[in-house]
Amino acid sequence: MLFYILRRVISAISVVIVTVVCSFLLFFAAPHDPAGVICGPKCTPERLKDITNSLNLDQPMVEQIGLYFKGIAVGRDYTAGGVTRHCDAPCLGYSYILGVPVTDLLARAVPVTLSIVIGGATIYLIFGVLIGTIAARVRGTTLDKAAVGTSLVIGSVPYFIVALVIALYATFLPRSQYTSFFENPIQWAGGLLAAWLCLGLTNSAQYTRYSRASMIEALGQDFTRTARSKGISERRVVYRHGLRAAMTPVITIFGVDVAYQLVNTIFTERIFQLPGLGTRIINAFNQYDLPVLMGGVIVGATVLVVMNLLVDILYTVLDPRVRLG
Amino acid sequence: MTDQTVRAPQTVTRTPRARAEGEEAYLEVTDLHVQFPTADGKVQAVQGLSYALPLRRTLAIVGESGSGKSVSSMAILGLHDRKSTWISGSIKVGGKEVVGMSEKDLMSYRGADAAMIFQDPQSSLHPFFTIGAQITESYRAHHNVSKRAAKARAVDMLGRVGIPNPSRRVDQYPHEFSGGMRQRAMIAMALVNDPKLLIADEPTTALDVTVQAQILDLIADLQRDFGSAVVFITHDLGVVAEIADDILVMYGGNAVEHGPVEKILGSPLHPYSWGLLESIPAVSGTPGPLHPIPGSPPSLLAMPSGCAFHPRCEFRDRVGGDLCRTLKPELIPRTADQGRTSRCHLKEPDKVFETEVLPRLP
């Protein structure tokens, strides 16, 4: 098990390294002038020189990548406007447009995104599984059809419309804002409630369907019949034997899905004006802020890789048949 | 043994327990009907099945897929979904009426009075719970004991069904067991509450032949120890010869022949039973072609009129007056032997078997 995790961590790190190299090449080896792009619209010749020098853009590509990795490992210096600034490790670059190290910028954004996704995911997991399980138990009845129908309708409405409806009509909710959890947990939850509801509502539809299908399958299995033949209550048959088996695939989907949500909260953040990762990346995109974009790509890749690793490890806990080695 | 039974393909090697007449039946099935309403119509899975089984006896129910053998046994444990199944008739187990029993009574009845060993232990055991957890769950459902006591009981049961090192195996998951060991664990789980009725639904089908024999011996041994009645569902006549006292041959949702094992395997009276014997491949001598019963089992949606077997029966023209097509025969004694019954209009079936069917047997 430990050996497996070690092996997986090593392969995860290599995936991230390959991502860094690829995105670096994409941004800096492309047939354009990266210094000019990074410098932005109000570029002066000195500033351009600064950027070229501190990013070593006149050096061979291999050297540039090496320096970038060195920055991630130990930090590096950037010169901007004649002033040299130190960028601490892990240094993902320096945004010349905003005048801040990319790591600082993203580090402020990540907790926002994380808060949105954690709250939203909790809501959709609980609601989705609950409704899906109930629908599976009363399969074929009006209640089941209503649950499936509603989930189809909600699932078919574009996400941003749901978000807009909540933003426009759910005015009784606290004003959307971000406060650090450690600063004021109540304000944190209040400010994020609208975003959570939006994320939770739209995604719970999908989890209702997953859970229902998975539960129907589990309840049709031979081991469910065995459980019934033991003389235990129907509730125990459904929730202990059925749900335990049905939840394994749902949790697997959930793990990967949360990773996906973490790098795709752009709509939520935009509509609810929360300064998360998505907002940062979109802003960087509009301003051609290459270092920030690259940092975003690296953070996104890392999140996906880490979540995948967690799901794999979690799976061994959920399903004793899965052996790691 | 007579010459005839020696020549029969399935020779009963051990002496079945003598049938004590008037022995009180522990399981009594009377005129059982099980139907499933579907979009295409009513599936008549079991149509008026009746039989009785005293303690300490083993009844083998044989028949092809769709003959209603599993469906009728599931009904004994009340395992059919109430909403999608229509059951009538009576199933009495130890004096308790199971048909129409309340959910609450079913809970205390299942597992305690009657338990079931299922066909495929791989899929019938829950993959995510340890063997021990699954056995103790059964035990604690009917005994108000501590977890520790229940686990001690589970270890004890695993030992009794011949699982080596039970105190270690009890904490393992089903996938860590071999097929035979899983079925032993399944048996331990079924017997943990000392049920007086054990239903084994093709318990050896998923196992290889050497393991099959071990499992059959185990069930027979345990039956002796526990003194229970056993219903053994199978389509393997070799297994029947090994384990059964009585045989009930089912066809199209009904019993077509019922009687002591040595008589039915030695000189069956129903053309369908003859077909079953003929279809057994010969393993010694010159290998010849297989002799399947012509035709296919009847659709449970549209049963043939009269005798359900008549479309496939080569003897239907021997019966006068188109009786086979129009009148469903009763399950009654057809020969001087009152201990066996069959559902066939054919006159003197014992003579027909001796002169026409027996010489054809492999």
Image (cartoon, coloured by chain):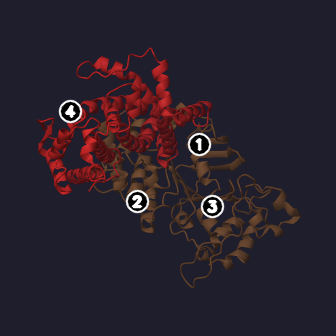
**Is residue B338 toward the left or the right of residue A311 in the image?**
right
Residue A280: image quadrant is top left
Give the mark, 2 or 3, whose residue is nearer the N terminus: 3
**In 3D space, how far apart are the residues under numbered discs 4 and 3 (Cα atoms)?**
81 Å
For the point 30% across and 17% down, which residue is it?
A186
**In 3D space, how far apart are the residues under numbered discs 1 and 3 (Cα atoms)?**
20 Å
Quarter holding the C terminus of chain B is: bottom right
Q: From the viewer's side, name the closer residue of B122 and B156.
A: B122
Q: Which chain is red?
A: A
Q: Which mark is residue B64?
A: 3
Residue carrying label 2 = B179
For the point 87% across and 65% down, which residue is it?
B320
Give the mark, 1 or 3, whose residue is nearer the N terminus: 3
Query: Is disc 3 on the same chain as disc 1?
Result: yes
In the displayed image of the protein, which residue is found farthest to the right? B321
**In 3D space, how far apart are the residues under numbered discs 2 and 1 (Cα atoms)?**
27 Å
Q: Secondary structure at mark 4?
A: loop
The kind of residue on which mark 1 rests is: His
In the displayed image of the protein, which residue is found farthest to the front? A45
Q: Chain of mark 3?
A: B
